[in-house]
């Protein structure tokens, strides 16, 4: 297991992008024949322990040794840090730059959207935020489970679900940074309103976080997504509920420890492709101590 060294987490709320990320799951719900990516292999095997791979300059820096020491000393590369409040202006610009990039892509242009992607997608996000899913007493009636299982589809419609799915598939390498930047902005609602024309209703993010962590419909969406999306959605949903706890607003009384333990293990064993892996784990280790 990773060391429980801590880095001060910035407990923000990125569910705005999180919601759009999960939207593509519904398409998979109706196409169960779609193959899923194979499980991640263990991070360390016996063979790797006895025969470690050679290091490269892309991951480490070699410094000439001093007399009496090895010829070269390996210095690990700095651990990527999540953006902080000091990076707020850059976060806004990076989000806008992403949507400008989308507007230049042929697959977006072929859809003939009625507005630039920033405006178009923001309108979709606003529709989702204005109509949160059912979180309590979901299993009392079968109709409620079905409504939750089709929630994103009913709000966005087939064409927008397909659009979301295509963006997620084509822009995998940009998804993590985009979510981190949205994550930062959610602590500053004025920036959403001023720079992105997005208004977040009171409690909407908390309801979606509980939806993904603790309802059959929400878990179904995540189970049909790739491991990267599933880990990021779960991570930010945990932060949202934790923030609700600290503010005395966890009205549904959702218990976080099971979700924290599950996600920590998943990232430790299968999260090597995460750019901010160490930062996520540091935050989760802190939360494990708080909720044990």
Image (cartoon, rainbow, N blue to C red):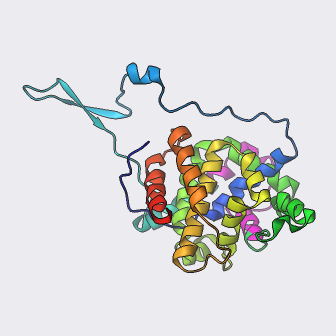
Q: Is residue 184 visible?
A: yes
The stretch drawn in magenta includes residue 108 = yes
Q: Is residue 112 visible?
A: no
- The part of the chain drawn in magenta is 100-128
Residue at the extreme front of the image, as rendered: 292
- Provide the major secondary structure of the magenta segment: helix
Residue 270 at x, y = what percent?
56, 39
Identify which residue is drawn at 59% across, 63% down.
256
Residue 49 at x, y = what percent?
40, 24
The stretch drawn in magenta includes residue 173 = no
Q: Would you identify the image quadrant in which residue 153 lies?
A: bottom right
Lateral position of residue 179 relative to residue 1, left or right? right
Q: Is residue 175 above or below residue 121?
A: above
Identify which residue is drawn at 61% across, 62% down.
237
Q: Nearer the viewer, residue 113 or 253?
A: 253
Q: Nearer the viewer, residue 80 or 260?
A: 260
Q: Is residue 60 above or below residue 84?
A: above
Q: Would you identify the image quadrant in which residue 206 lies?
A: bottom right
């Amino acid at each position: 297991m990773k060391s429980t060294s801590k880095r001060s987490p910035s407990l923000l709320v990125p569910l705005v992008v999180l919601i759009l990320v999960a939207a593509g799951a519904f398409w998979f719900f109706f196409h169960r024949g779609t193959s899923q990516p194979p499980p991640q292999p263990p991070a360390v095997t016996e063979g790797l322990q006895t025969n470690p791979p050679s290091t490269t300059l892309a991951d480490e820096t070699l410094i000439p040794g001093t007399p009496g020491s090895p010829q070269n000393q390996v210095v690990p590369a700095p651990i990527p840090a999540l953006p902080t409040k000091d990076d707020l202006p850059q976060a806004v610009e990076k989000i806008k730059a992403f949507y400008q990039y989308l507007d230049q892509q042929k697959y977006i242009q072929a859809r003939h959207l009625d507005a630039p992607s920033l405006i178009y997608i923001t309108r979709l996000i606003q529709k989702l935020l204005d109509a949160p899913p059912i979180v309590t007493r979901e299993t009392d009636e079968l109709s409620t489970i079905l409504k939750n299982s089709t929630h994103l589809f009913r709000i966005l419609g087939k064409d927008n679900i397909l659009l979301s799915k295509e963006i997620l598939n084509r822009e995998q390498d940009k998804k993590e940074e985009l979510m981190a930047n949205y994550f930062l902005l959610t602590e500053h609602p004025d920036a959403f309103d001023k720079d992105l024309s997005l208004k977040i209703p009171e409690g909407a993010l908390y309801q979606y976080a509980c939806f993904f962590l603790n309802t059959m419909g929400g878990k179904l969406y995540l189970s049909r997504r790739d491991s990267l999306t599933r880990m990021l959605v779960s991570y930010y949903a945990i932060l949202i509920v934790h923030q609700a706890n600290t503010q005395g607003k966890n009205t549904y009384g959702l218990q976080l420890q099971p979700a924290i333990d599950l996600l920590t293990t998943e990232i430790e064993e299968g999260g090597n492709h995460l750019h901010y892996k160490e930062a996520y784990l540091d935050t989760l280790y802190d939360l494990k101590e708080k909720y044990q």
